[in-house]
Amino acid sequence: MTRFHFSLQVLLSIVFLLSLTWVVPATAQKTKAEEPAATCAGLPFQQRTRIAVATFTVSTPSAQGKFGDNLSAMLSNVLVESNCFRVLESSKNLESLFEEIALGNKGAVKQGTGAEAGQMLGAQLLISGEITEFSENEGGGAIGALVGRSLSAVGVIKAHVGFILKIVNPTTREIITSRSFERKVTKVGLAAAGGVPAAGLGYKSKAMADAIEEAIMESSKWLVNEKDMMLEALGTGNMGGANKVVFNKDNCPVLKSGQAPTVMVIIPEVHITQRIPDPAGETEIIRQLIQAGFKVLDPTVYKAIRETPQLSDALKDASAASKLGSRFGADIIIIGEAFSEFAGNASSGMRSCRARVEARAVRTSDARILAADGQHAGGVDVSEFTAAKLALRNAGALMGDYFLNQLCQGAQGGDAPTALSNSEIVLSNVNFTSIGKIETMLKSQKGVESVKKTLAGTNGRIEISHSCSIDDIANSLASGKAGLTVEITGFADQKIEGKVK
């Protein structure tokens, strides 16, 4: 090309660009979308809904390369900056995280400083997208122009991008709500000859970059505006620990009296066909009960019965379970079975196992089943056996939550176990008939579970198990409800002394 032709080419390009300022509408000269404001800056982190943004699927053949990955990454970034959500890493990018966990499990990092398996959070909601529109059309009589040493098209670029966003409950697969977004942007500019994608993202113009940014910003604002609706759709039962009640003597009625019921927990565990020596699910349930304030029997006390027919019978029959619990002085026995199995290989040499724990709580005084449920969970580790233990522990944690809710919250409705106290009534000047009347009165009193009397001469002794207060029993005796006049001569936490007149 001669110098004359080169100069003419450049001159024509300049003239053409100047002429376009007359024909391109003012609306086409859009400025870059504003940066998102931190709209939820005051929202506590633990109260934010956990979300994950999935890679956008592509329904139009005109979108190329990793355009779906690009859009999901952009949306995730904007949602993080909004401070309205806890945005989780996409499942597609977990390989490096598994590698870091594997380092800790293999002993390659200092103990206590490595990432732990089984601690990743799950998404309460999934944001999925589908790209439905993608086009970059050149118009307005574009001509070639030399830019540096490359020949590029100079003209009006019309970009059009559109996608559908869906908010999905990953547990139920329900689409809570969805909405479509699209942007059309027209700009004067350059497009690389041959349609080479800009930065490998599948588009080649500033017009498309602006269209994408504006659509992402609009969609992020919509998601922020819908955050309260998301919580309502999830309900309090799906908050994944955010609203979990921590029980203690202040909010658990059965613990308020200071006489917590004694609980026995026995849940043998098997991994495939191999007995697990130290049951992880059972241990987790015990830990939660003790933390709340329940009295729990030491499993070593009844270790010998784990392989006996007594346990087999108790697993099948509530009456046999109540007798087993009573034998060891338990007010409540939580009894069941658990198993785990290999679920497959995960990333970075990690092994995955699934576990299920099934158990029921039985009141030993009357063999009444107070609660029964089954929960399953997973665990990951470089060792299959350790992964199984983690899975059993996680399932046990869910069962512990369940039993605490039943034993504590259920008591507020009057249908849960109450703490039983064992007290004695020592009476003088009684005979077989009078102590019999007192026994009948006590059995009919609300809150008295069991009554056992003994008589030696004119001295009588009555042992009672009760959930009502010792004061109520003393008042009933003194008020003559038994048809006798009883003078209370001594009173303590678990003992009443009296004389029949």
Image (cartoon, rainbow, N blue to C red):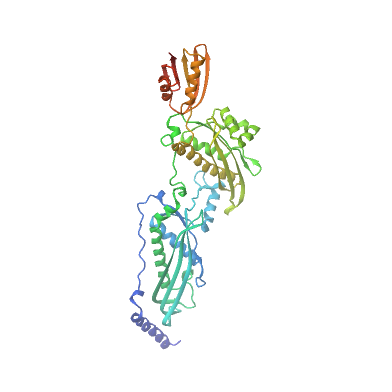
| Residue 319, above or below 37 | above
Residue 228 in sight in this render: yes
- Work out which quarter of the rendered image holds the C terminus and state it: top left
Question: Whole-percent x and y of residue 21?
Answer: 34, 80
Question: Residue drawn at (49%, 64%), measured in percent from left and top?
Answer: 56
Give the image quarter of residue 249.
Answer: top left
- Count of picture labels: 0
**Residue that extends furthest to the top in the rendered view of this protein:** 457
For this orientation, the residue located farthest to the front is 483
The relative height of residue 74 versus residue 449 in the rendered view (above or below) is: below
| Residue 100 spot, x, y in % from top left | 52, 51
Q: Is residue 337 above or below residue 302?
A: below
- Which residue appears at 37% of the width and 83% of the height? 16
Side (left or right) of 461 relative to 207: right
Q: Nearer the viewer, residue 216 or 94?
A: 216
Q: Nearer the viewer, residue 133 or 1?
A: 133
Q: Position of residue 201 (x, y in %)?
A: 48, 68
Image x and y of residue 112, in percent: 50, 43
Q: Is residue 386 visible?
A: no
Q: Note whether 311 is above or below 34 in the view shown.
A: above
- Out of 326 and 460, give the one closest to the viewer: 460
Residue 484 quadrant:
top left
Instruction: Residue at 46% x, 67% y: name it.
Output: 163
